[in-house]
Amino acid sequence: MTTTTATPIILPADWRDFLALTKPRVMTLVVFTGLCGMLAAPVAIDPVLGFTAILCIALGAGAAGALNQWYEADLDAKMKRTARRPLPAGRMDRQSALHFGVGLASFSVILMGLAANLLAAGILAVSILFYVLVYTVWLKRRTPQNIVIGGAAGAFPPLIGWAAATGHVATLPLLLFAIVFLWTPPHFWALALFMKSDYAAAGVPMLPVVSGERVTRTQIGLYTIPMAVAAIAPWALGLTGAVYGLVAAIATLVFAALALQVSLRTTGAKDAMRPEKRLFAWSVLYLFILFGAVVIDRWVFA
Amino acid sequence: MNRPEDAPRSSVPPSIWQKPTEAENDAIRKRQRSRSIVMALLLGAFVVLMFGISIAKIKGGMAH
Protein backbone atom coordinates (compact mmCIF):
# COMPACT_ATOMS: atom_id res chain seq x y z
CA MET A 1 0.00 0.00 0.00
CA THR A 2 1.40 3.37 -0.91
CA THR A 3 0.76 6.51 1.05
CA THR A 4 0.32 9.80 -0.72
CA THR A 5 0.98 13.24 0.68
CA ALA A 6 -1.63 15.79 -0.21
CA THR A 7 -0.42 18.98 -1.87
CA PRO A 8 -0.77 22.07 0.29
CA ILE A 9 -3.40 24.62 -0.61
CA ILE A 10 -1.79 27.50 -2.53
CA LEU A 11 -3.52 30.82 -2.08
CA PRO A 12 -3.66 33.05 -5.15
CA ALA A 13 -1.22 35.97 -4.77
CA ASP A 14 -2.67 39.13 -3.31
CA TRP A 15 -2.84 42.20 -5.60
CA ARG A 16 -0.55 44.01 -3.14
CA ASP A 17 2.13 41.42 -3.89
CA PHE A 18 1.90 42.26 -7.60
CA LEU A 19 2.31 45.90 -6.65
CA ALA A 20 5.35 45.03 -4.50
CA LEU A 21 6.89 43.25 -7.51
CA THR A 22 7.09 46.57 -9.31
CA LYS A 23 9.44 48.08 -6.66
CA PRO A 24 7.30 51.21 -6.12
CA ARG A 25 9.99 53.08 -4.17
CA VAL A 26 12.55 52.73 -6.98
CA MET A 27 9.81 53.78 -9.38
CA THR A 28 9.41 57.21 -7.75
CA LEU A 29 12.89 58.31 -8.84
CA VAL A 30 12.37 56.87 -12.33
CA VAL A 31 9.02 58.65 -12.71
CA PHE A 32 10.46 61.90 -11.39
CA THR A 33 13.45 61.93 -13.76
CA GLY A 34 11.19 60.94 -16.67
CA LEU A 35 8.76 63.74 -15.81
CA CYS A 36 11.62 66.25 -15.56
CA GLY A 37 12.95 65.13 -18.95
CA MET A 38 9.50 65.76 -20.39
CA LEU A 39 8.99 69.13 -18.67
CA ALA A 40 12.46 70.33 -19.67
CA ALA A 41 11.65 69.74 -23.35
CA PRO A 42 11.06 72.87 -25.43
CA VAL A 43 7.76 71.49 -26.78
CA ALA A 44 4.58 71.32 -24.71
CA ILE A 45 2.89 67.93 -24.81
CA ASP A 46 -0.88 67.40 -24.43
CA PRO A 47 -1.51 66.75 -20.71
CA VAL A 48 -3.32 63.44 -21.35
CA LEU A 49 -0.56 62.19 -23.64
CA GLY A 50 2.08 63.43 -21.20
CA PHE A 51 0.36 61.65 -18.32
CA THR A 52 0.16 58.48 -20.40
CA ALA A 53 3.85 58.69 -21.30
CA ILE A 54 4.83 59.04 -17.63
CA LEU A 55 2.46 56.18 -16.77
CA CYS A 56 4.20 54.05 -19.41
CA ILE A 57 7.62 54.90 -17.95
CA ALA A 58 6.31 53.86 -14.51
CA LEU A 59 4.77 50.63 -15.88
CA GLY A 60 7.93 49.82 -17.83
CA ALA A 61 10.05 50.34 -14.70
CA GLY A 62 7.59 48.20 -12.74
CA ALA A 63 7.78 45.46 -15.36
CA ALA A 64 11.58 45.51 -15.27
CA GLY A 65 11.43 45.30 -11.46
CA ALA A 66 9.04 42.35 -11.63
CA LEU A 67 11.23 40.48 -14.12
CA ASN A 68 14.28 41.26 -11.98
CA GLN A 69 12.55 39.74 -8.95
CA TRP A 70 11.43 36.74 -11.01
CA TYR A 71 15.02 36.03 -12.07
CA GLU A 72 16.61 36.82 -8.71
CA ALA A 73 14.22 35.05 -6.35
CA ASP A 74 17.04 32.77 -5.15
CA LEU A 75 19.35 35.74 -4.44
CA ASP A 76 16.60 37.74 -2.74
CA ALA A 77 15.95 34.85 -0.36
CA LYS A 78 19.54 35.09 0.90
CA MET A 79 19.51 38.82 1.61
CA LYS A 80 17.87 40.36 4.69
CA ARG A 81 16.87 43.46 2.71
CA THR A 82 14.96 41.44 0.10
CA ALA A 83 13.92 38.22 1.84
CA ARG A 84 10.40 39.48 2.51
CA ARG A 85 9.62 40.16 -1.15
CA PRO A 86 6.65 38.18 -2.54
CA LEU A 87 8.68 35.45 -4.28
CA PRO A 88 11.29 34.58 -1.63
CA ALA A 89 8.61 34.85 1.06
CA GLY A 90 6.51 32.27 -0.85
CA ARG A 91 3.48 34.52 -1.29
CA MET A 92 3.59 34.17 -5.08
CA ASP A 93 4.72 31.53 -7.59
CA ARG A 94 7.46 32.44 -10.07
CA GLN A 95 5.30 31.84 -13.13
CA SER A 96 2.81 34.52 -12.05
CA ALA A 97 5.69 36.99 -11.62
CA LEU A 98 7.05 36.15 -15.07
CA HIS A 99 3.66 36.50 -16.77
CA PHE A 100 2.98 39.74 -14.92
CA GLY A 101 6.40 41.19 -15.87
CA VAL A 102 6.23 40.25 -19.55
CA GLY A 103 2.61 41.39 -19.84
CA LEU A 104 3.27 44.73 -18.16
CA ALA A 105 6.42 45.36 -20.24
CA SER A 106 4.59 44.67 -23.52
CA PHE A 107 1.63 46.77 -22.44
CA SER A 108 3.77 49.76 -21.45
CA VAL A 109 5.74 49.76 -24.72
CA ILE A 110 2.65 49.38 -26.93
CA LEU A 111 0.76 52.10 -25.04
CA MET A 112 3.78 54.44 -25.28
CA GLY A 113 3.90 53.84 -29.05
CA LEU A 114 0.19 54.63 -29.37
CA ALA A 115 0.07 57.66 -27.06
CA ALA A 116 3.47 59.29 -27.67
CA ASN A 117 5.68 58.10 -30.53
CA LEU A 118 7.74 55.14 -31.71
CA LEU A 119 11.07 56.67 -30.60
CA ALA A 120 9.90 56.94 -26.98
CA ALA A 121 8.44 53.41 -27.17
CA GLY A 122 11.70 52.11 -28.64
CA ILE A 123 13.86 53.68 -25.90
CA LEU A 124 11.44 52.35 -23.27
CA ALA A 125 11.75 48.84 -24.73
CA VAL A 126 15.55 49.12 -24.81
CA SER A 127 15.63 50.31 -21.18
CA ILE A 128 13.49 47.37 -19.99
CA LEU A 129 15.56 44.85 -21.96
CA PHE A 130 18.80 46.47 -20.79
CA TYR A 131 17.78 46.22 -17.12
CA VAL A 132 16.54 42.65 -17.40
CA LEU A 133 18.97 41.05 -19.86
CA VAL A 134 22.18 43.11 -19.55
CA TYR A 135 22.08 44.02 -15.85
CA THR A 136 20.05 41.27 -14.15
CA VAL A 137 20.85 38.22 -16.26
CA TRP A 138 24.30 39.01 -17.63
CA LEU A 139 26.23 41.37 -15.35
CA LYS A 140 24.89 41.25 -11.81
CA ARG A 141 26.22 37.82 -10.83
CA ARG A 142 29.37 37.99 -12.96
CA THR A 143 31.26 41.22 -12.41
CA PRO A 144 31.75 43.98 -9.82
CA GLN A 145 31.26 46.39 -12.73
CA ASN A 146 27.57 45.30 -12.75
CA ILE A 147 26.18 48.61 -11.55
CA VAL A 148 28.59 50.71 -13.63
CA ILE A 149 27.25 49.37 -16.94
CA GLY A 150 23.84 48.44 -15.54
CA GLY A 151 23.40 52.01 -14.35
CA ALA A 152 22.45 52.93 -17.90
CA ALA A 153 19.09 51.19 -17.41
CA GLY A 154 18.05 53.71 -14.77
CA ALA A 155 19.35 56.62 -16.83
CA PHE A 156 16.90 56.20 -19.72
CA PRO A 157 13.74 57.85 -18.23
CA PRO A 158 14.70 61.52 -18.84
CA LEU A 159 15.56 60.55 -22.40
CA ILE A 160 12.18 58.82 -22.79
CA GLY A 161 10.32 61.79 -21.29
CA TRP A 162 12.05 64.19 -23.68
CA ALA A 163 11.51 61.89 -26.68
CA ALA A 164 7.81 61.52 -25.79
CA ALA A 165 7.39 65.31 -25.88
CA THR A 166 9.54 66.16 -28.89
CA GLY A 167 9.87 63.00 -30.99
CA HIS A 168 13.66 63.33 -31.06
CA VAL A 169 16.72 63.31 -28.77
CA ALA A 170 18.92 66.35 -28.07
CA THR A 171 22.07 67.25 -26.09
CA LEU A 172 20.29 68.19 -22.83
CA PRO A 173 18.48 64.85 -22.35
CA LEU A 174 21.71 63.05 -23.26
CA LEU A 175 23.45 65.01 -20.48
CA LEU A 176 20.61 64.12 -18.08
CA PHE A 177 21.20 60.48 -19.10
CA ALA A 178 24.94 60.92 -18.38
CA ILE A 179 24.24 62.46 -14.95
CA VAL A 180 22.16 59.45 -13.80
CA PHE A 181 24.58 57.00 -15.42
CA LEU A 182 27.63 58.50 -13.64
CA TRP A 183 25.70 59.05 -10.39
CA THR A 184 24.80 55.35 -10.11
CA PRO A 185 28.25 53.94 -9.09
CA PRO A 186 28.89 56.24 -6.09
CA HIS A 187 25.23 55.89 -5.08
CA PHE A 188 25.20 52.07 -5.18
CA TRP A 189 28.70 51.60 -3.80
CA ALA A 190 27.81 53.75 -0.78
CA LEU A 191 24.88 51.37 -0.23
CA ALA A 192 27.08 48.33 -0.88
CA LEU A 193 29.57 49.48 1.78
CA PHE A 194 27.01 49.27 4.57
CA MET A 195 25.15 46.27 3.05
CA LYS A 196 28.35 44.38 2.26
CA SER A 197 27.55 41.35 4.41
CA ASP A 198 24.15 40.99 2.73
CA TYR A 199 25.69 40.98 -0.75
CA ALA A 200 28.46 38.62 0.37
CA ALA A 201 25.90 36.17 1.80
CA ALA A 202 24.02 36.16 -1.51
CA GLY A 203 27.22 35.77 -3.55
CA VAL A 204 26.66 38.98 -5.51
CA PRO A 205 30.07 40.26 -6.67
CA MET A 206 29.61 43.85 -5.56
CA LEU A 207 32.83 45.86 -5.48
CA PRO A 208 33.27 45.86 -1.65
CA VAL A 209 32.83 42.05 -1.63
CA VAL A 210 35.25 41.35 -4.49
CA SER A 211 37.90 44.10 -4.17
CA GLY A 212 37.43 45.25 -0.59
CA GLU A 213 36.42 48.48 1.10
CA ARG A 214 39.58 50.45 0.26
CA VAL A 215 39.16 50.03 -3.51
CA THR A 216 35.43 50.80 -3.27
CA ARG A 217 36.06 54.00 -1.33
CA THR A 218 38.65 55.12 -3.88
CA GLN A 219 36.26 54.33 -6.74
CA ILE A 220 33.48 56.35 -5.08
CA GLY A 221 35.82 59.33 -4.98
CA LEU A 222 36.97 58.83 -8.57
CA TYR A 223 33.48 58.36 -10.06
CA THR A 224 32.29 61.52 -8.32
CA ILE A 225 34.59 63.57 -10.60
CA PRO A 226 32.95 62.72 -13.98
CA MET A 227 29.55 62.85 -12.29
CA ALA A 228 30.27 66.40 -11.11
CA VAL A 229 31.43 67.37 -14.61
CA ALA A 230 28.22 65.95 -16.12
CA ALA A 231 26.12 67.77 -13.50
CA ILE A 232 27.66 71.13 -14.31
CA ALA A 233 27.80 70.54 -18.10
CA PRO A 234 24.19 71.62 -18.92
CA TRP A 235 24.93 75.08 -17.49
CA ALA A 236 28.51 75.24 -18.84
CA LEU A 237 27.25 74.43 -22.36
CA GLY A 238 24.56 77.10 -22.13
CA LEU A 239 21.69 74.60 -22.22
CA THR A 240 20.32 75.82 -18.88
CA GLY A 241 20.45 79.13 -17.04
CA ALA A 242 22.00 80.39 -13.83
CA VAL A 243 19.29 78.87 -11.59
CA TYR A 244 20.34 75.35 -12.55
CA GLY A 245 24.04 76.31 -12.55
CA LEU A 246 23.89 77.62 -8.97
CA VAL A 247 21.79 74.76 -7.60
CA ALA A 248 23.93 72.14 -9.39
CA ALA A 249 27.17 73.71 -8.14
CA ILE A 250 26.05 73.80 -4.49
CA ALA A 251 24.43 70.33 -4.52
CA THR A 252 27.45 68.82 -6.29
CA LEU A 253 29.85 70.42 -3.81
CA VAL A 254 27.94 68.82 -0.93
CA PHE A 255 27.96 65.47 -2.79
CA ALA A 256 31.72 65.78 -3.44
CA ALA A 257 32.43 66.64 0.21
CA LEU A 258 30.46 63.60 1.43
CA ALA A 259 32.11 61.37 -1.20
CA LEU A 260 35.55 62.66 -0.23
CA GLN A 261 34.84 61.89 3.43
CA VAL A 262 33.78 58.34 2.50
CA SER A 263 36.73 57.80 0.17
CA LEU A 264 39.33 58.88 2.75
CA ARG A 265 37.86 56.88 5.64
CA THR A 266 39.06 53.65 7.16
CA THR A 267 36.65 51.71 9.35
CA GLY A 268 36.87 49.35 12.28
CA ALA A 269 34.99 46.10 12.81
CA LYS A 270 31.79 47.53 14.31
CA ASP A 271 31.60 50.84 12.49
CA ALA A 272 28.12 52.39 12.22
CA MET A 273 28.94 53.54 8.65
CA ARG A 274 27.28 56.91 9.22
CA PRO A 275 29.18 58.84 6.47
CA GLU A 276 28.32 56.09 3.94
CA LYS A 277 24.64 56.21 4.92
CA ARG A 278 24.74 59.99 4.74
CA LEU A 279 26.26 59.87 1.23
CA PHE A 280 23.62 57.35 0.13
CA ALA A 281 20.75 59.47 1.49
CA TRP A 282 22.18 62.66 -0.04
CA SER A 283 22.73 60.95 -3.39
CA VAL A 284 18.99 60.23 -3.65
CA LEU A 285 18.07 63.77 -2.66
CA TYR A 286 20.78 65.12 -4.98
CA LEU A 287 19.16 63.64 -8.06
CA PHE A 288 15.75 65.04 -7.08
CA ILE A 289 17.30 68.49 -6.53
CA LEU A 290 19.27 68.45 -9.80
CA PHE A 291 16.35 67.36 -11.98
CA GLY A 292 13.95 69.68 -10.19
CA ALA A 293 16.39 72.53 -10.86
CA VAL A 294 16.48 71.71 -14.60
CA VAL A 295 12.70 72.07 -14.80
CA ILE A 296 12.51 75.24 -12.70
CA ASP A 297 15.36 76.76 -14.70
CA ARG A 298 13.57 75.99 -17.95
CA TRP A 299 10.38 77.57 -16.67
CA VAL A 300 12.23 80.66 -15.44
CA PHE A 301 14.24 81.19 -18.63
CA ALA A 302 11.74 79.90 -21.21
CA MET B 1 10.19 13.90 -9.10
CA ASN B 2 8.94 11.22 -6.71
CA ARG B 3 6.74 13.07 -4.31
CA PRO B 4 3.43 14.56 -5.44
CA GLU B 5 4.19 17.85 -3.69
CA ASP B 6 7.29 18.27 -5.89
CA ALA B 7 5.29 17.94 -9.08
CA PRO B 8 3.83 20.91 -10.94
CA ARG B 9 0.23 21.46 -9.93
CA SER B 10 -1.16 20.38 -13.29
CA SER B 11 0.58 16.98 -13.17
CA VAL B 12 -0.78 16.03 -9.77
CA PRO B 13 -3.86 13.82 -10.08
CA PRO B 14 -6.89 15.62 -8.68
CA SER B 15 -7.63 12.57 -6.54
CA ILE B 16 -4.74 13.39 -4.21
CA TRP B 17 -5.30 17.15 -3.99
CA GLN B 18 -6.00 18.20 -0.48
CA LYS B 19 -9.57 19.31 -0.06
CA PRO B 20 -9.54 22.91 1.19
CA THR B 21 -11.09 23.54 4.56
CA GLU B 22 -13.93 26.02 4.92
CA ALA B 23 -11.52 28.69 6.24
CA GLU B 24 -9.12 28.14 3.32
CA ASN B 25 -12.00 28.34 0.85
CA ASP B 26 -13.03 31.64 2.39
CA ALA B 27 -9.46 32.96 2.18
CA ILE B 28 -9.19 31.93 -1.49
CA ARG B 29 -12.53 33.54 -2.37
CA LYS B 30 -11.65 36.73 -0.47
CA ARG B 31 -8.36 37.04 -2.33
CA GLN B 32 -9.97 36.28 -5.71
CA ARG B 33 -12.62 38.89 -4.99
CA SER B 34 -10.09 41.60 -4.09
CA ARG B 35 -8.08 40.79 -7.23
CA SER B 36 -11.22 40.96 -9.36
CA ILE B 37 -12.14 44.35 -7.92
CA VAL B 38 -8.64 45.73 -8.58
CA MET B 39 -8.72 44.29 -12.12
CA ALA B 40 -12.14 45.85 -12.79
CA LEU B 41 -10.91 49.24 -11.55
CA LEU B 42 -7.78 49.00 -13.71
CA LEU B 43 -9.81 48.07 -16.79
CA GLY B 44 -12.19 50.97 -16.12
CA ALA B 45 -9.22 53.34 -15.81
CA PHE B 46 -7.77 51.93 -19.05
CA VAL B 47 -11.02 52.59 -20.93
CA VAL B 48 -11.08 56.20 -19.65
CA LEU B 49 -7.39 56.60 -20.57
CA MET B 50 -7.92 55.28 -24.11
CA PHE B 51 -10.86 57.66 -24.52
CA GLY B 52 -8.65 60.56 -23.35
CA ILE B 53 -5.82 59.52 -25.69
CA SER B 54 -8.24 59.31 -28.63
CA ILE B 55 -9.64 62.79 -27.93
CA ALA B 56 -6.11 64.23 -27.53
CA LYS B 57 -4.99 62.64 -30.80
CA ILE B 58 -8.08 63.90 -32.66
CA LYS B 59 -7.51 67.41 -31.27
CA GLY B 60 -3.84 67.20 -32.25
CA GLY B 61 -4.81 66.10 -35.77
CA MET B 62 -7.31 68.95 -36.13
CA ALA B 63 -4.71 71.48 -35.00
CA HIS B 64 -2.46 70.44 -37.87
Image (cartoon, helix red, strand yellow):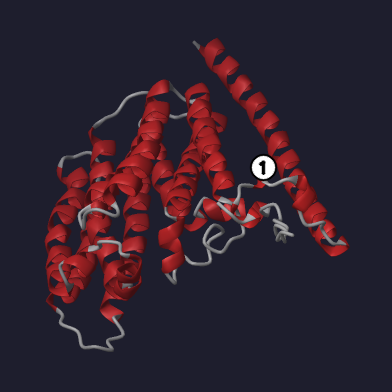
Q: Is residue A4 left or right of residue A168?
A: right
Check the picture and name the quadrant holding the N terminus of chain A: bottom right
Q: Is residue B25 left or right of residue A156?
A: right
Q: Is residue A209 left or right of residue A160?
A: left
The spot of residue A101 in percent (x, y) is: 52, 41
Chain where mark 1 sits: B
Q: Residue at x 42, y 28 (%)?
A: A121
Q: Residue at x 50, y 31 (%)?
A: A106
The spot of residue A38 in percent (x, y) is: 41, 37
- Kindly give the residue lying farthest to the front in the view shown: A1
Check the picture and name the quadrant holding the C terminus of chain A: top left
In depth, the one of A233 and A140 nearer the eye is: A140
Label 1 belongs to which residue?
Answer: B10
Residue A45 visible in the picture:
yes
Q: Secondary structure at mark 1?
A: helix
The residue type indicated by label 1 comes to Ser
In depth, the one of A45 and B34 nearer the eye is: B34
Residue B37, quarter of picture: top right
Residue A190, quarter of picture: bottom left
Q: Residues within 10 Å of mark 1 (few under 14, many from 20)?
A: few
Above or below residue B32? Residue A205 is below
Q: Residue at x 24, y 53 (%)?
A: A142
The spot of residue A75 in percent (x, y) is: 40, 60
The spot of residue A91 in percent (x, y) is: 62, 59
Residue A165 visible in the picture:
no
